[in-house]
Image (cartoon, rainbow, N blue to C red):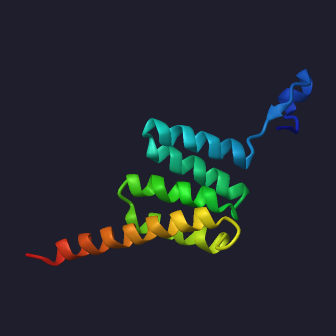
Amino acid sequence: MYCCYSSKASKTKEPIKVKTANDHELEGNKFYAEGDYKKAVESYNQSLAIESKNAVIHTNKGLALQKLGQLEDALKSFDEALEKDPEGAKSIAANTATYRDSLLEEIEKANNAKERP
């Protein structure tokens, strides 16, 4: 998508490329596939700043956070995904619920391990 002109661009009449939510999401997916989960989360955050109601992006962010070991943050992302679209995308909601349940188990195991001497 092209939009706006900067003062520099206005002299040359070159449009400035403005990334859309989809651009950031695709960039996040690329980083995720490459195993760069930190950059994936950053891209998903940029996408969500533009389009906060997208359950797929919340789910993808949760998966990346899970890979980073940030389990409680991942859980929050999965909960957001379910809240944003509990009915419209049943397969996403079902997958997210599965990830969420799995994550709750991981958190419980980690907490139990911390409590043991």
Residue 49 lies in quadrant: bottom right
Answer left or right for 61 relative to 48.
left
- Answer left or right for 104 relative to 26: left
Number of residue marks: 0
Could you tell me which quadrant the N terminus lies in?
Answer: top right
Residue 51 lies, in percent from the top left, at: 72, 58
Q: Residue at the location (54% across, 67% down)?
A: 94
Residue 77 seen anywhere in this rendered image of the structure = no
Residue at 75% x, 45% y is 20
Q: Position of residue 109 (x, y in %)?
A: 25, 72
Residue sitting at 70 percent across and 65 percent down? Answer: 53
Image quarter hosting the C terminus: bottom left
Residue located farthest toward the left when viewing the structure as drawn: 117
Q: Is residue 6 above or below residue 116?
A: above
Q: Can residue 81 be seen in this view?
A: yes
Picture coordinates of residue 17, whole percent (x, y): 78, 34
Q: Quadrant of residue 18?
A: top right
Report which quarter residue 111 is drawn in.
bottom left
Residue 81 is situated, as x and y percent measured from the top left of the image, at 59, 67
Is 103 on the left or on the right of 17, as rendered? left
Q: Is residue 12 above or below residue 57?
A: above
Name the residue at 88% across, 39% down. Answer: 4
